[in-house]
Image (cartoon, helix red, strand yellow):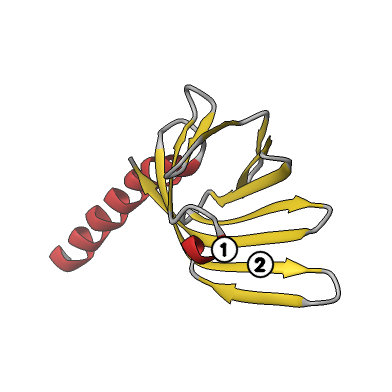
Amino acid sequence: MKIIRNLAVIAMGCFALSPVIASDFDGSKALICATVEARDCVLSLGCVDGEAREIGAPAFMRIDFAKKTITGTERTTPIVFSDASENQLLMQGMELGYGWTFAINQGNGEFSASLTDINGTFLLFGSCTLD
């Protein structure tokens, strides 16, 4: 009986913490994001995999939702559009002639991002954590 009661207390504690964990990636708190994979894709030439710095993308980015900015190692870009759905936080903007989209999984903080112009697309994949 004591074991069942202890398990019930642990389960209730986990359920009580789950809204706190889920809200970490909802756009209410600043994040630090690290690029894990990067690809440079050009029409007719295909894609080349590499590290973020090899293709000219930042290895780390800070997302400040209060200021509506994403800051990389060399520059800061404004978040022009954002939308939170049930599963993801979506942001968009423009920087150096590229249109970009940044999507964060609200459950685990993983992200995918694209930067596109008429010459091709950069694809970034990684993870975010609280700043």
Q: Which residue is mark 1?
A: 55
Separation (CA) of disc 1 from disc 2: 7 Å
* On-image quarter of the N terminus: bottom left
Type of the residue with mark 2: Asp
Residue at screen point 62% across, 69% down: 39
Of all residues, the one furthest to the left in this rendering is 2
User: Which residue is nearer to you in this view: 79 or 121?
Assistant: 121
Horizontal and vertical percent position of residue 113? 62, 54
User: Which residue is nearer to you in this view: 128 or 55?
Assistant: 55
Classify 10 Å Cα crowding around label 1: few (below 14), some (14-19), many (20 and above).
some
User: Which residue is nearer to you in this view: 50 or 93?
Assistant: 50
- What secondary structure is marked by label 1? helix
Whichever of callouts 1 and 2 sits on the residue coming sooner in the sequence is 2
Position of 1 with respect to 115 (left or right) is left
> Which numbered circle lies on residue 40?
2
Q: Quadrant of residue 10?
A: bottom left
Horizontal and vertical percent position of residue 27? 51, 34
Classify 10 Å Cα crowding around label 2: few (below 14), some (14-19), many (20 and above).
many
77 w.r.t. 36: above or below: above
* On-image quarter of the C terminus: top left
Q: Quadrant of residue 43?
A: bottom right
